[in-house]
Image: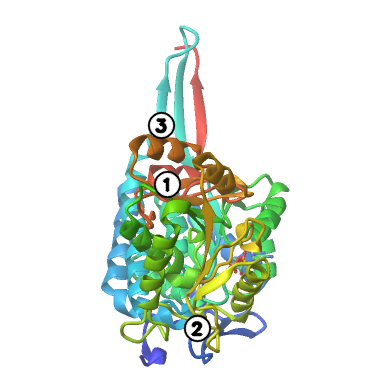
Amino acid sequence: MPLNNTVLFRQQAFIDGAWVDADNGQSIKVNNPATGEIIGTVPKMGAAETRRAIEAADRALPAWRELTAKERAGKLRRWFELMMANQEELARLMTMEQGKPLAESRGEIAYAASFLEWFAEEGKRIYGDTIPGHQPDKRLLVLKQPIGVTAAITPWNFPAAMITRKAGPALAAGCTMVIKPASQTPFSALAMAALAEQAGIPRGVLSVVTGSAGEVGSELTSNPIVRKLSFTGSTEIGRQLMAECAKDIKKVSLELGGNAPFIVFDDADLDAAVEGALASKYRNAGQTCVCANRLYVQDSVYDAFTDKLKAAVAKLKIGNGLMDGVTTGPLIDEKAIAKVEEHISDAVALGAQVVAGGNSLGGSFFEPTILVNVPKNAKVAKEETFGPLAPLFRFTDESDVIAQANDTEFGLAAYFYARDLSRVFRVGEALEYGIVGINTGIISTEVAPFGGIKASGIGREGSKYGIEDYLEIKYLCLGGI
Ligand code: ADP
């Protein structure tokens, strides 16, 4: 694709309705993780440019907030349509900067766009309450109002969806937003900003600032105009940003790390469990926060499940995501490879065996890998791998596996396969996670609440709950009536 000539390939940031460079003229190079080639640059902005974006969002707020929900919905709907009309080009751009196979990128664009469609509609249903008065002359009303200027900091693993999950509800609710995309994948964000502009989203309502995470981030968290921050990324950075937001008591939504257990019980449909494990573990080369991180398989089906998973993994095709038939792209960078290698060597040193893959293939490609007989004290039981490594732990007892599954600071997604109805309810209720996939490895949809408990985060994205994160509750007490 001749990137230079496309309307959607933007190498400037988008602030207050204008395409701009950094004040100091500096830029950040963006590479293609499949080839190592530089595909372009984006401005390396800092606090000053971020402040301008925040001030523009503040100026744009009153008029945007005062539109009817239907008027805002019309623009969001148009943005959704433009994303779908440009699905192929957006998908190619995403694969080039992120590495995921083209089929997954197309899927992500549709998924990302769905949040705009959903929240455009949901914005019309921001209902308040009337409460019976506590005294004869009183009438009590509850209004829900947009929180104001908001900020979003997003990661590289879902370069499009992590933006619309935040911008969709924010804009639908009547908030304005400044977005800082990950420096590894800024082009998807900028392409979406170009489409938002085409869709008629007014200037200042949505800005995209690229640049230094620390500088842009600390302006977003310290500027008092910003009333809310939504962040998706690591728990470590989330904790830091939350602490920074504490100064002004900014509202935060955090979608942080996970350590998803994937449990296969002896009454499971094993073929379905293998299909689910494949989707949940190896999608995006294992780089999603809801990827199965630890697979627990009950004794009596352990060998059968292992054999079936091995056969399925043998069919995966590794390569440049732009090529036909590729199912597994590169990891984002060499640091990601090092983490996978560390988890494998640690588990092997403790007695685990590699039964599939196990090797780096050069660049940032790593073979889909399976480890068996992984002991409980392996690092991979505690830490998120974020790579194509499936460690299989053996268990006997239901309550013991639930205890192991819950023995983590994280609480984002969990999965299990079972057919006994009592067990399905028992286990579903006992797992301490925000999301539980039962007999499925794919749980994401714009219509359901996505988010974690414990150190995995605060707040929910998608669904009717997702818009609440962008609203304040106001209670009107009318007296003397
Ligand atoms: P990941 O492991 O997904 O890269 P990070 O938490 O490091 O997770 O990054 C997620 C997002 O947070 C990215 O946009 C990154 O640029 C941003 N980020 C990283 N460090 C900081 C920081 N100190 N302040 C603000 N944002 C940051």
Q: Quick one: label 1, few (<14), some, or many (20+) residues within 10 Å?
A: some
Element under disc 1: loop
Instruction: Give the spatial CA distance, label 2 vs label 3.
Output: 43 Å
Q: Mark 3 is on which residue type?
A: Gly
Q: Measured from the top left, where is residue 91 in percent x and y?
A: 36, 76
Up the image or down, 230 lies above or below 321; here it is: above
Q: Mark 2 is on which residue type?
A: Gln
Q: Measured from the top left, where is residue 304 in percent x and y?
A: 39, 61
Q: Measured from the top left, where is residue 315 in percent x and y?
A: 35, 77
Instruction: Give the spatial CA distance, label 3 vs label 1.
Output: 20 Å
Q: Nearer the viewer, residue 65 or 389?
A: 389
Label 2: which residue?
11
Up the image or down, 221 lies above or below 88; here it is: above
Q: Nearer the viewer, residue 25 or 401?
A: 401
Label 3: which residue?
128
Q: Quadrant of the C terminus?
A: top left
Label 1: which residue?
449
**First in sequence: mark 2 vs mark 1:** 2
Q: Quadrant of the N terminus?
A: bottom left
Ligand 1 appears in which quadrant? bottom right
Instruction: Give the spatial CA distance, label 2 vs label 1.
Output: 34 Å
In the picture, measured across the screen, residue 341 lies left or right of residue 295, that is right
- The single residue placed furthest to the top in the displayed view is 136
**Residue visible at 49% across and 11% down?**
134
Q: Measured from the top left, where is residue 166 in percent x and y?
A: 47, 56
Q: Mark 1 is on which residue type?
A: Pro
**First in sequence: mark 3 vs mark 1:** 3
Element under disc 3: loop
Up the image or down, 313 lies above or below 148; here it is: below
Q: Is residue 223 visible?
A: no
Callout in the foreground (3, 1): 1
**Residue visible at 49% across and 80% down?**
367
